Image: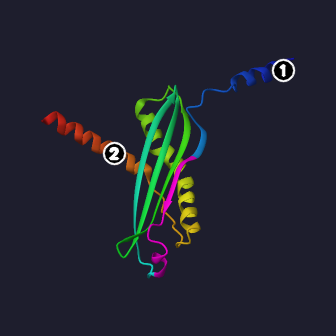
Amino acid sequence: MADEQQVNGAAQDDAPQQQAFQIQRVYVKDVSFEAPNSPAVFRQEWKPELSLDLNVNNTKLEDNTYEVVLKITATNKVNGEVAFLAEVHQAGIFTIADSLEDGQRAHLLGAFCPNILFPYARETLSSLVSRATFPQLNLAPVNFDAVFAQHIQRQQQEAAEATQQ
């Protein structure tokens, strides 16, 4: 009988607590691919000029639930002409507990969630480029923590400049 009470007591101690962060869903929200100068671009020597644009947006869906969208646009030019333009909007729905401070929530939405989404977006982008028979596109990892820190620093500088005027 004493053993039963300990087991029941342990079960109560192990009761699920509210998780501070959960991934609800990861999905592709939008995909676009253009090769405006094909087939002529396939006949040129491949000396690509790649430019990447990354953007992160988040929207509060309901209490504690957010959609985060990582947008990656890759534009590749050869001899000044666009070889291809590929864009992926990789999204996720995340639950973030109210118990977190605003700074922690902002870091999760601006850095942690994009880190989760990036490998999916990178794979989708690579697949699009390969299916169009262009040479494989392998994006290097992105340090979203550093990008987020720069964003916060830039906001603080702008706020400080606004108060000085």
Q: Position of residue 24 (x, y in %)?
A: 61, 37
Instruction: Say which residue appears at 55% left-offset and 68% top-offset.
Output: 132
**Viewer-closest of 57 and 164:** 57
- Quadrant assignment, res 19: top right
Q: Is residue 53 magenta?
A: no
Q: Which residue is mark 1?
A: 4
**Viewer-closest of 115 and 67:** 67
The earlier-in-sequence mark between 1 and 2 is 1
Task: Name the amino acid type tagged 1.
Answer: Glu
Q: Is residue 113 left or right of residue 10?
A: left
Instruction: Say which residue appears at 39% left-offset and 50% top-offset.
Output: 146
Label 2: state its secondary structure: helix
Q: Is residue 82 left or right of residue 122?
A: left
Mark 2 nearby-residue class (10 Å; few <14, some 14–19, many ≥20): few
Q: Which residue is mark 2?
A: 151
Question: Which segment did they paint magenta?
Answer: 28-43
Does 122 sit above or below residue 26? below
As drawn, which residue projects farthest toward the right?
1
Q: Position of residue 133 (x, y in %)?
A: 56, 72
CA separation in Å, label 1 and label 2: 55 Å
Q: Position of residue 82 (x, y in %)?
A: 40, 68
Label 1: state its secondary structure: helix
- Quadrant assignment, res 103: top left
Instruction: Say which residue appears at 54% left-offset and 70% top-offset.
Output: 136
**Viewer-closest of 120 and 113:** 120
According to the image, what is the colour scheme of the structure? rainbow
Task: Name the amino acid type tagged 2.
Answer: His
Q: Position of residue 86 (x, y in %)?
A: 48, 60
| Mark 1 or 2, closer to the camera | 2
Quadrant that contains the C terminus? top left
Quadrant that contains the N terminus? top right
Q: Is residue 25 left or right of residue 41?
A: right
